[in-house]
Amino acid sequence: MARIEGVDLPRNKRIDIALGYLYGIGRKNAVDVLAKAQVDGSIRTQDLADTDIARIRDVLQREYRVEGELRKEVAMNIKRLIDLGTYRGSRHKRGLPVRGQRTHTNARTRKGPRRAVAKKK
């Protein structure tokens, strides 16, 4: 089982797909990492040699921020916006959409389930 950056990669998927399970690595970055590590992307994760895994791990540690380090950086960026008192920071703090989306309708993912308002008698 390939374990990279503390994440167990799925055994029966192609390695270019399996690298997407790492936070911060998408399809494009996965292909780039495999090219730099000189590993064929069509090989299944379970069929990788230990040397291939070591080369992939080396490229990721050298050139990419992934998993905990990236999560920490994103959290610090959001905390900085909140501390500065920016509009974006206030939206993060209140749990509302940050990038200008409408909230009169929609935005249920950020706002959570609807809450009933009591009617006047």
Image (cartoon, rainbow, N blue to C red):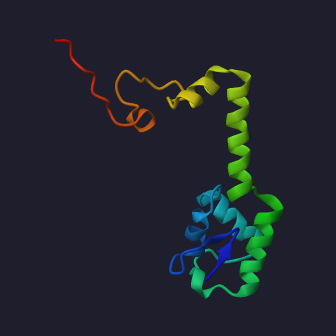
| In the depicted structure, whether residue 115 falls above or below residue 59 | above
How many marks do you count on the picture?
0
> In the picture shown, does residue 70 fall above or below 83?
below
Residue found farthest to the top: 121
Image coordinates of residue 16 in percent, x first then y, are 60, 69
Residue drawn at 70 percent across, 56 percent down: 68
Query: Is 59 displayed left or right of 29 in the figure?
Result: right
Q: Residue extending furthest left?
A: 121
Observer-nearest of 120 and 87: 120
The residue lying at 32 percent from left, 30 percent from top is 115
The answer to whether residue 119 is above or below residue 111 is above
For residue 41, side relative to residue 96 (left or right):
right
Residue at the limit of the structure toward the right, as seen here? 62
Quarter of the image that includes the N terminus: bottom right
Tell me if I can see residue 66 in this picture.
no
Specify the quadrant that holds the C terminus. Answer: top left
The answer to whether residue 99 is left or right of residue 76 is left
Corner quadrant of residue 62: bottom right
- Closer-to-camera residue (70/118): 118
Q: Residue at x 75, y 72 (%)?
A: 57
Image location (x, y in percent) of residue 48: 65, 85
Instruction: In this rendered view, identify the residue nearer to me: 17 or 69.
Output: 69
Would you identify the image quadrant in which residue 67 lies? bottom right
Toward the front, the furthest residue is 121
Left or right, residue 100 beside residue 52:
left
In the rendered image, residue 81, in percent from the top left (x then y), is placed at 70, 28
**Whether residue 94 can be seen here:** yes
